[in-house]
Each structure stands twice: as structure tokens, then as C-alpha cells.
Image (cartoon, rainbow, N blue to C red):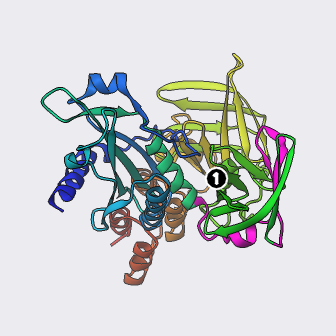
């Protein structure tokens, strides 16, 4: 027990310095669909790095509350215990840490010369009310015959760690889905549409692959689809409108969304335009306007009605043309380079993982230098008066506190700062810093 707790503690200390360094530039991790078998290490890196940094960490920030992500992580690590053969050995809800597998020196006794062992620690950290960071640490050791130690540390290639992050992402995307009801239908294999699986209402399936037909029975348990053919049982993973086979290949349900679209729409029941979850919205009319980087208010871009855009990012200005098809926006620079983004409600998420939020008056939060309050006043444009509702909308759009506070300080306001009003703000997830500035802005 002491060894296990010490291992978990050391791993947690290693993670502590890594998890807290949140970057607004974070890109989406490379998903790993099928479970990576074997050792999954890079020996040439491990031999060089051994003793310098003996554990690999893969991490990602999910746009979901801590409670949801913690629940998804518990389910994902349970699946890892059965699929990956590393059972959970410790769960510490107070610190948000889970350990799968355990490295034990005694366990290497009697093992072959190429034997290896590993252990994992997953840490879940609340960053904000709506952002949660998950870090997956893996340490791997190999048995060695010579030397003063019975094993040496080797470097993980990160695939199993990213597979765990993929499971967590899928758990979040598929929350509330009753797969026993939704699984029925025909699924075609990506890039090989002639191959397909059809799940029938009577509990039978028809499989066509490589020119050969086969049939059998199927069962659905949670997100696991079991295809039964005599004594042979093949287990597959169900996703929203997709099936993932043992090699990581996806089979897409006819008439359903791809996984990318599903992940982009499942965290809210309806989008800002009031469309039901799962519909692809045409944003071609509503796209024009000004957008600011949610995590860095000095970066912004403007989509103009004439199909041109202006972008200010990382201290550099860009201009070009854009087009919107459905919920995908594509920007094209004069040299032909393209960049795409996913539109949802009043936000755009680019390929680098940045989220840009549409706002009515960018000048008030200090983004573009061109539009000033003075020019707005001279043109006769009425000055916006902020209310509690405006603050709740900005918080719902996940604007950082610095942006919301700047907006308050540069606008007229009429806030309800009564006891009931403050309680409602707190319950809605408004931070203490924002509430304090709101209270200070009310005339005495």
C-alpha cells in the first residue's frame, strides 16, 4: 500500500508543474481510435532521456465543467482497465487523480530479458467554470540484465496516453445517448464505402467486407457493440452515429454526422441560433461581424459583408477573402493559403483550437485600434448600457474575466446588485472578480 501511494504521489508531483501551464495556443490532441498494443515506447529517446525526464505527459483542455469531465474520466479509466489490461489501483476524488497499473520491482522477478511494465496517473484539474484540463502521465520501465538496477526507464511514444484522452472525449460527446435505441441502422466504412455493417431491429446483423457476406447476432452494452458469430465474439465501440472497430477504423451511419461534427455539437443541447442539436446550420448570412480571441483580447478579425476579412493575430495583420458553407468558414490569403474554422452560434473555432467570439463592439474591450468610442459618439450611435443579462451572456460565451471587466469599465451600466441579484450572478457562474467590479460600478 505504501509503495502504491508513494508512486501515485510522485506522479502527482510530476504532473503539478505541467497541468497548471495553460496555453491559449493549445491544439487539439491527435486522436487514437484503436487501442495501441504492445510496449509503445521510443527506445532511442528513452535511452537518451533516462534519468532526466522519466515520464511522458499528454494533456488537453476540455470545454466542459469539472464534474462532467471527472465522470467521463472515471468511465474511461475503467474501460482502460479492461481493454488495456491495466486495472485501476487508486482513485483520489479529492485531488482529481486516478492511477491505472503499478510498477513493482518484485514483479520483474522471473520475467524475461525483454519484460516491461508501466503505470498511468490521470489528473483532472478545474481551470474555470467551463474549462477542465486532463493530463495523462505514463512511466515505462524495462528489465535489464546488467547494471546496478534491475530495470531502466524508457520513453513512452504517447499513443496510449492519447487513446485515453480520446476515450474521455468520446465519453463527453456521447453522454445521455441510449445506444440500444440509436445503434440500429447501416454503417459504411470510411474510405471503403462498399464495406458495411447493418444492425437490424431483430438483434441480427449483416456484414459485408472485402466482397464477403456474413451474419450473426449482436448485443449492445453501454457503448460496446458485440458481434456474435457462433463462438466468435468481436467487440466494437459505439459513438454517436459511428462504430469504431478494433483497428481504429470508423464506420459511419448512413444519414448520420461524422465524428468531427458530433464532437462539435454535443456539448450544448441547442446552439445560439436555436437550432436542435445535430443540425448543420447555414451561417452564411449571420457570419459578418467582428470576433475577438476568447483568451487574448488583442487578437481579433472582422468578416465584412463583401466577402473580405481583416485579421490581427500575434502582432501581424492579414487580409483576404472568405466564404461560408454551412457551418464551415474558409479564409483565403492573396497567396492562395487557406485556413478553416468551425462556426457554432456566435463563436468560431479555428484549426489551431482557438475560439473567437462575436461581439457587438470590439473597441470597448481594446481589440481593434481603428474604432474608438469617440467616433461612435460623433456618429450619433447610442451608448450601450450594460445590465446583468449582458454579463451573463458574456460569461456564457466563455469570455475571460479580463475582457468582461474591461467591457464593464468602458461602458455605462445599470446593474442589479441587490442581494438576490448578486446571488443569481454567483449561481450562474460569474466570477468573484467580475461581481466585485459590477458592484463597484453602481453609483453610490
Q: Residue at x 45, y 71 (%)?
A: 415
Q: Position of residue 157 (x, y in %)?
A: 42, 33
Residue 387 % position (x, y): 51, 68
Q: Is 100 placed above or below 60 here?
A: below
Q: Is residue 415 magenta?
A: no
**Camera-side residue of 127 and 6:** 6
Q: SS for tag 1?
A: helix
74 or 352, which is in the foreground? 74
- Residue that mark 1 sits on: 264
**Residue 59 or 120: which is nearer the viewer?**
120
Q: Is residue 196 magenta?
A: yes
Q: Where does residue 89 sit, x and y in percent of width and height?
A: 31, 61
Q: Is residue 34 visible?
A: yes
Where residue 34 appears, x then y in whole percent? 58, 45
Task: Please indicate, yes or no, whether residue 373 appears anywhere in the rendered image.
Answer: no
205 over 24 or under it: above or below: below
Left or right, 429 with respect to 45, comes to: right
Q: Residue at x 80, y 39 (%)?
A: 192
Magenta residues (range): 173-202
Label 1 neighbour load within 10 Å: few <14, some 14-19, many 20+: some
Residue visible at 29% across and 52% down?
102
Q: Give left or right: position of 101 versus 232.
A: left
Please name the residue shown 20% across and 59% down the image: 5
Look at the picture and state if 376 lies above or below 440. above
Amino acid at each position: 500500500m505504501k509503495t502504491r501511494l508513494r508512486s501515485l504521489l510522485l506522479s502527482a508531483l510530476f504532473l503539478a508543474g505541467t497541468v497548471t501551464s495553460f496555453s491559449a495556443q493549445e491544439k487539439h490532441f491527435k486522436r487514437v481510435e484503436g487501442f495501441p498494443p504492445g510496449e509503445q515506447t521510443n527506445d532511442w529517446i528513452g535511452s537518451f532521456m533516462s534519468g532526466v525526464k522519466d515520464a511522458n505527459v499528454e494533456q488537453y483542455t476540455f470545454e466542459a465543467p469539472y464534474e462532467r469531465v471527472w465522470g467521463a474520466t472515471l468511465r474511461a479509466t475503467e474501460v482502460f482497465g479492461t481493454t488495456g489490461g491495466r486495472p485501476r489501483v487508486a482513485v483520489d476524488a479529492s485531488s482529481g487523480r486516478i492511477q491505472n497499473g503499478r510498477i513493482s520491482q518484485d514483479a520483474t522477478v522471473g520475467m524475461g530479458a525483454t519484460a516491461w511494465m508501466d503505470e498511468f496517473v490521470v489528473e483532472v484539474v478545474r481551470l474555470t467554470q467551463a474549462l477542465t484540463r486532463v493530463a495523462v502521465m505514463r512511466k515505462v520501465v524495462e528489465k535489464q540484465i546488467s547494471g546496478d538496477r534491475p530495470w531502466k526507464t524508457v520513453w513512452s511514444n504517447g499513443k496510449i496516453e492519447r487513446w485515453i484522452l480520446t476515450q474521455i472525449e468520446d465519453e463527453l460527446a456521447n453522454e445521455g445517448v441510449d445506444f440500444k435505441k440509436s445503434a440500429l441502422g447501416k454503417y459504411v466504412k470510411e474510405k471503403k464505402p462498399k464495406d458495411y455493417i447493418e444492425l437490424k431491429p431483430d438483434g441480427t446483423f449483416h456484414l459485408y467486407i472485402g466482397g464477403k457476406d456474413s451474419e450473426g447476432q449482436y448485443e449492445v452494452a453501454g457503448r460496446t457493440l458485440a458481434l456474435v458469430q457462433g463462438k466468435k465474439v468481436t467487440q466494437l465501440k459505439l459513438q454517436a452515429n459511428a462504430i469504431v472497430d478494433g483497428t481504429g477504423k470508423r464506420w459511419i451511419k448512413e444519414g448520420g454526422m461524422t465524428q468531427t461534427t458530433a464532437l462539435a455539437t454535443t456539448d450544448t443541447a441547442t446552439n445560439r441560433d436555436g437550432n436542435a442539436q445535430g443540425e448543420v446550420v447555414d451561417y452564411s448570412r449571420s457570419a459578418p461581424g467582428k470576433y475577438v480571441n476568447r483568451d487574448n483580447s488583442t487578437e481579433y478579425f472582422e468578416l465584412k459583408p463583401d466577402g473580405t476579412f481583416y485579421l490581427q493575430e500575434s502582432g501581424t495583420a492579414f487580409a483576404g477573402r472568405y466564404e461560408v458553407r454551412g457551418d464551415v468558414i474558409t479564409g483565403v490569403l492573396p497567396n492562395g493559403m487557406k485556413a478553416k474554422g468551425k462556426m457554432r452560434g456566435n463563436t468560431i473555432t479555428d484549426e489551431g483550437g482557438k475560439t473567437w467570439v462575436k461581439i457587438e463592439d470590439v473597441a470597448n474591450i481594446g481589440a481593434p485600434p481603428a474604432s474608438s468610442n469617440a467616433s461612435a459618439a460623433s456618429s450619433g450611435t447610442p451608448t450601450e448600457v450594460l445590465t446583468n443579462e449582458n454579463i451573463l451572456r458574456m460569461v456564457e460565451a466563455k469570455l475571460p474575466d479580463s475582457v468582461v471587466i474591461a467591457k464593464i469599465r468602458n461602458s455605462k451600466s445599470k446593474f442589479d446588485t441587490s442581494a438576490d441579484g448578486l446571488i443569481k450572478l454567483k449561481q450562474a457562474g460569474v466570477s468573484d472578480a467580475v461581481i466585485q467590479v459590477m458592484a463597484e460600478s453602481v453609483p453610490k
